[in-house]
Image: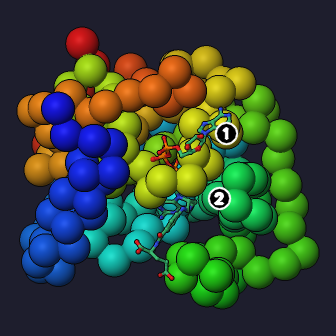
Amino acid sequence: MDTKEAVRLACKTKRAALRAEDCEQWTIALTREIVKLSQYKKAQKIMLYLAMPREANLDAVITQALQDGKDVYVPVCTDKTTMIAVRLHSLSDVTTGVLHIRIPNEPYDIINPSELDLVLVPGAGFDYRGGRMGMGNGYYDRFLSILRPEQFIGVCWNMQILSQEIPMEDYDVRMTQLITETGLLQCQ
Ligand SMILES: Nc1nc2c(c(=O)[nH]1)N(C=O)[C@@H](CNc1ccc(C(=O)N[C@@H](CCC(=O)O)C(=O)O)cc1)CN2
Ligand SMILES: Nc1ncnc2c1ncn2[C@@H]1O[C@H](COP(=O)(O)OP(=O)(O)OP(=O)(O)O)[C@@H](O)[C@H]1O
């Protein structure tokens, strides 16, 4: 079996090779799939993420959620192991963080993770059993460890779901559901 780092590199390489035009098309379908989810409709406090290039993009979902009057939160990494959820009032009220990801401008309005109704979780790759390959710092594993599985859904492009199982450690948090541009998938 491949090592976790080999799988991570393969996932990141495959994502980096995607065409921007394909990602734009998929974003339209992904947005539609997310906003029709009952979990999305029911959620008042929702954590999304500000996508990196080629990553499943949620900007249109964020715009919709703000319009729907939901409280929107996005991740901010404050050190090598800690990630906090910070309120976002507008997609234009952001700056670029050290990881070259957009983050909200300070001052931060931070929410306790347990108060979130729904967390949409990014990943470099997922498998059909809900295994997740992240960016390698364990930020989401720590963040999600105190939440119930119904509170979070993995988000990626359909081509990022691997047929091989992602190597998982004890601390890795499994998804029970994945959402892609082709729809919702219940993990086995
Ligand atoms: N959009 C998004 N935000 C997120 C995550 C994510 O996966 N996606 N994260 C999920 O945990 C956290 C950030 N984790 C990250 C960990 C490592 C790298 C990283 O290594 N990036 C570049 C190098 C950094 C740079 O550009 O200087 C790389 O891929 O080589 C990026 C994000 C929180 N925010
Ligand atoms: N709950 C936890 N408690 C302590 N350490 C953890 C925990 N979860 C993960 N780690 C540490 O984080 C490191 C990275 O984990 P992993 O490779 O699974 O990250 P990832 O899920 O891919 O990254 P991310 O969540 O940041 O996208 C591991 O070496 C592990 O030691």
Does the residue tagged 2 have its C-beta within 8 Å of any atom of ligand 1? yes
Instruction: Report x, y in % for residue 105.
Output: 77, 81
Q: Are marks 1 and 2 in contact (CB under 8 Å)?
A: yes
Badge 1: residue crowd in 10 Å (few <14, some 14–19, many ≥20): some
Circle 2 SS class: strand
Q: Residue at x 70, y 61 (%)?
A: 80
Asked if residue 28 shows in the view, the reply is no
Instruction: Report x, y in % for residue 12.
Output: 27, 63
Residue picked out by circle 1: 143
Circle 1 SS class: helix
100 left or right, relative to 163? right
Instruction: Give 98 or 136, whichever is nearer the viewer.
Output: 136
71 left or right, relative to 38? right
Please identify the quarter of the rendering in which residue 27 is found: bottom left
Please identify the quarter of the rendering in which residue 93 is found: bottom right
Give the amino acid at mark 2: Pro
Q: Is residue 47 above or below residue 75?
A: above
Quadrant containing the N terminus is top left
Task: Please report whichever mark, 1 or 2, sits nearer to the chain's N-terminal start.
Answer: 2
Give the amino acid at mark 1: Phe
Residue picked out by circle 2: 75
Instruction: Report x, y in % for residue 112.
Output: 83, 40
Please identify the quarter of the rendering in which residue 28 is found: bottom left
What is the residue that sits farthest to the top in this orientation?
188
- Split into quadrants, the picture shows ligand 2 in the one at top right
